[in-house]
Amino acid sequence: MLAVAVLALQLFFLLRVALMVVVAPESTTFQRSEIWRLVVEKHSLPWAQESVSRERISDNLRRAVIASEDAGFVDHHGVEWGAVEKAWNKNEKAEARVEAQQTRATPRRGRDGKAARRSRSNWRRTCSFPASATSRARRRNWSSR
């Protein structure tokens, strides 16, 4: 059931992107949230938007928009393989670091074989003699006074 839902969601996204090739989107998510904010705060919509053809947009403006998103877009045509490799290596190092920490962080075990918590009472359990013997000796010393 979950697989069908995930597949349906992916199909929805694919169709939505494919539809944008043919039909220009009226607004972006950011624009819709800004419209909503203006309506709620000012109870009016001072918003005007008009689509223009590609020929009416300056080449300099198009380059500026691309540069603001990704300055090297014209050089790598959509994928910066160096950045992908750098991220891959960074993730591998992080995974290795986590694995190394997991192997080192084995819990200490007392005489009874149970994992000891790190507290003073459990520290006594990991010592060479049982904690119960020390507590009995203390009780005897206090009771004899």
Image (cartoon, helix red, strand yellow):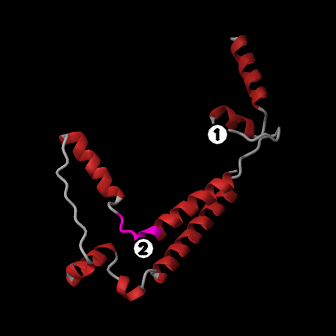
| Mark 1 closeness class: few <14, some 14–19, many ≥20 residues within 10 Å | few
Label 1 residue SS: loop
Residue 117 in the image, given as x and y percentages of width and height:
67, 38
In this rendering, would 41 be left or right of 131? Answer: left
What's the amino acid at mark 2? Val
**For residue 127, above or below residue 18:** above
Residue 50 in the image, given as x and y percentages of width and height:
22, 65
Queried whether the magenta region covers residue 15, the answer comes back as: no
**For residue 132, above or below residue 12:** above
121, 113: nearer the viewer:
113
In this rendering, would 119 be left or right of 143? Answer: left
Numbered circle sitting on residue 64:
none
Mark 1 lies on residue = 118
Q: Gap in Å between the C-alphas at discs 1 and 2?
A: 61 Å
Queried whether the magenta region covers residue 23, the answer comes back as: yes
- Quarter of the image for residue 6 reads bottom right
View extreme (right): residue: 112
| Mark 2 closeness class: few <14, some 14–19, many ≥20 residues within 10 Å | few
54, 117: nearer the viewer:
54
Label 2 residue SS: helix
Numbered circle sitting on residue 21:
2
Residue under the image location 47 percent in, 82 percent down: 82
For marks 1 and 2, the one nearer the N-term is 2
Residue 141 in the image, given as x and y percentages of width and height:
71, 18
**For residue 96, above or below residue 58:** above
- Region rendered in magenta: 19-25
Residue under the image location 23 percent in, 43 percent down: 39
In this rendering, would 124 be left or right of 71? Answer: right
| Quarter that holds the C terminus | top right
